[in-house]
Image (spheres, rainbow, N blue to C red):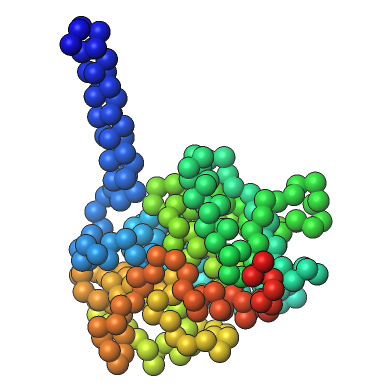
């Protein structure tokens, strides 16, 4: 092998090693720093709730951040105990349905994201169109009146969203480090559509038992029940809105156990369940035709 070929091979190997190191650094950067979540079983560390809990370690602490309740729900200061979607009057928390039967949700994605991250976010948004009448679409800035209420997807501290439609520019935070995962994006968008966590359902005590002795001190309020509209659907352990059995654990022990069968898997969804989809279609009165085309 001549000298030029050897030099080329060395350079190629060096480049591959650099790329591999950068990949490992990026992958580990999402989870830097130790926390109680690191003590849970390995197979539970990439659940929706584990990803959100790890990313939200400092969420809500910046000057311009809203208060964060239930792990990732944003509320205005002073409304920490309110059910955000049901406590407002004179302004529907549902996104309006158009004459064609579809529900259009305008959005803007921040330039903070790389092209790959933007593609991941858009792919998660498009997944709603495959089975519901909800259509996330880029905001048409020239039609101000029509798109005056919209989602602004940006990389703030952690993963969080308000519940339901709000007025004007509505932030959904998907931090580049820790939140740009398909299931996490779907989870936050479901909040923006008006949905709460499954374990907060009004009928949850018939399906799970909360083990308060294992919850991180000061995080007990994350397990409060709220008055929910369950839309005639059964409790769903497989919902992408259900936190895992180790959510907010202070000692590596479960904080939620399903009943009567304690061995049922909970909070392991990697995408919306069939019941998540059914709830969207029932809440927004989607017709079969609107999402089968």
Q: Is residue 159 above or below residue 276?
A: above
Say whether residue 192 is visible.
no
- Say whether residue 269 is left or right of residue 17: right
Quarter holding the C terminus is bottom right
Task: Name the residue at 56% across, 89% down.
Answer: 232
Q: Position of residue 44 (x, y in %)?
A: 27, 66
Task: Name the residue at 47% across, 88% down.
Answer: 234
Task: Name the residue at 20% across, 66% down.
Answer: 41
Q: Position of residue 131 (x, y in %)?
A: 58, 69
- Say whether residue 208 is left or right of residue 110: left
* Front-most of residues 221 and 258: 258
Q: Position of residue 60 (x, y in %)?
A: 46, 57
* Front-most of residues 23 and 173: 23
Say whether residue 245 is visible.
yes
* Front-most of residues 206 and 136: 136
Question: Residue 37's image quarter?
Answer: bottom left
Q: Residue most toward the front? A: 1
* Front-most of residues 262 and 286: 286
Q: Is residue 243 above or below residue 104?
A: below
Q: Position of residue 122 (x, y in %)?
A: 56, 52
- Say whether residue 96 is left or right of residue 51: right
Q: Residue most toward the left? A: 1
Q: Residue most toward the top? A: 3
Q: How many marks?
A: 0
Question: Residue 287's image quarter?
Answer: bottom right
Task: Name the residue at 54% across, 74% down.
Answer: 277
Quarter holding the N terminus is top left
Q: Is residue 179 above or below residue 291?
A: above
């Amino acid at each position: 092998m001549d000298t030029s070929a050897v030099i080329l091979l060395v350079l190629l190997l060096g480049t591959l090693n650099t790329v591999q190191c950068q990949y490992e650094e990026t992958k580990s950067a999402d989870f830097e720093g130790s926390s109680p979540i690191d003590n849970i079983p390995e197979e539970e560390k990439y659940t929706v709730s584990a990803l959100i809990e790890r990313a939200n370690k400092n969420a809500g602490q910046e000057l311009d951040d809203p208060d964060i309740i239930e792990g990732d729900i944003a509320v205005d200061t002073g409304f920490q105990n309110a059910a955000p979607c049901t406590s407002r009057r004179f302004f529907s928390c549902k996104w309006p349905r158009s004459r064609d039967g579809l529900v259009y949700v305008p959005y803007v994605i921040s330039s903070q994201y790389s092209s790959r991250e933007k593609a991941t976010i858009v792919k998660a948004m498009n997944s709603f169109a495959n089975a519901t009448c909800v259509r996330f679409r880029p905001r048409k800035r020239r039609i101000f009146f029509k798109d005056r209420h919209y989602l602004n997807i940006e990389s703030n501290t952690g993963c969080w969203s308000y519940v339901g439609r709000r007025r004007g520019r509505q932030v959904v935070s998907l931090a580049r480090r820790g939140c740009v995962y398909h299931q996490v994006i779907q989870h936050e968008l479901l909040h923006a559509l008006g949905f709460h966590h499954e374990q907060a359902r009004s009928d949850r005590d018939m399906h799970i038992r909360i083990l308060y002795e294992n919850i991180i001190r000061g995080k007990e309020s994350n397990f409060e029940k709220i008055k929910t509209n369950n839309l005639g659907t059964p409790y769903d352990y497989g919902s992408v809105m259900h936190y895992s059995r180790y959510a907010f654990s202070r000692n590596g022990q479960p904080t939620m156990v399903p009943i009567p069968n304690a061995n049922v898997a909970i909070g392991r969804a990697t995408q919306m369940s069939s019941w998540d989809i059914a709830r969207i279609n029932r809440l927004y009165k989607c017709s079969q035709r609107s999402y089968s085309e």
